[in-house]
Amino acid sequence: MRGGFTRVEQTLIDGGRGVAVIQQRMEFQELMRERFTSVIRDATGREVIGFMSGNQQNPDLMCEVFVLAPSDLDDKRQLGERPERPARAA
């Protein structure tokens, strides 16, 4: 995502206090970890086995990454993967 800093955060960044903005965001993400992962778990029906949040100030970029546990789909075609080919003899 781009353009996600609040006006207050942008003012701090412009004033040379960008480290404080990133630290505050990291603290907030850690505090909200369970709530965020619950929302994703409920929406997908899959457990969240990893959550990572990243912020960059120049250019202004943010990301939230949720790593989901494997699904119960065992047919690779259902997962969008190509079936494995038999190995060729040498």
Image (cartoon, rainbow, N blue to C red):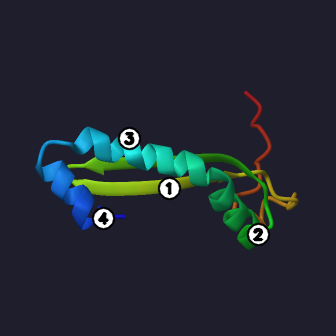
In percent of width and height, residue 59 lies at: 21, 53
Element under disc 2: helix
Element under disc 1: strand
Residue found at the far left of this picture? 15
- For residue 4, side relative to residue 70 (left or right): left
Q: Earlier in the sequence, mark 2 or mark 1?
A: 2
Q: Earlier in the sequence, mark 1 or mark 3?
A: 3
Say which of marks 2 and 3 sits in front: 3
Q: What residue sits 62% from the left and 51% below the top? A: 33
- For residue 29, side relative to residue 43 (left or right): left
From mark 4 to mark 3, how far is it between C-alphas?
A: 19 Å
Q: Which residue is mark 3?
A: 23
Element under disc 3: helix
Q: Earlier in the sequence, mark 4 or mark 2?
A: 4
Q: Which residue is mark 1?
A: 64
Given residues 69 and 17, the one toward you in this image is 17
In the rendered view, tell whether residue 88 sits above or below residue 5.
above
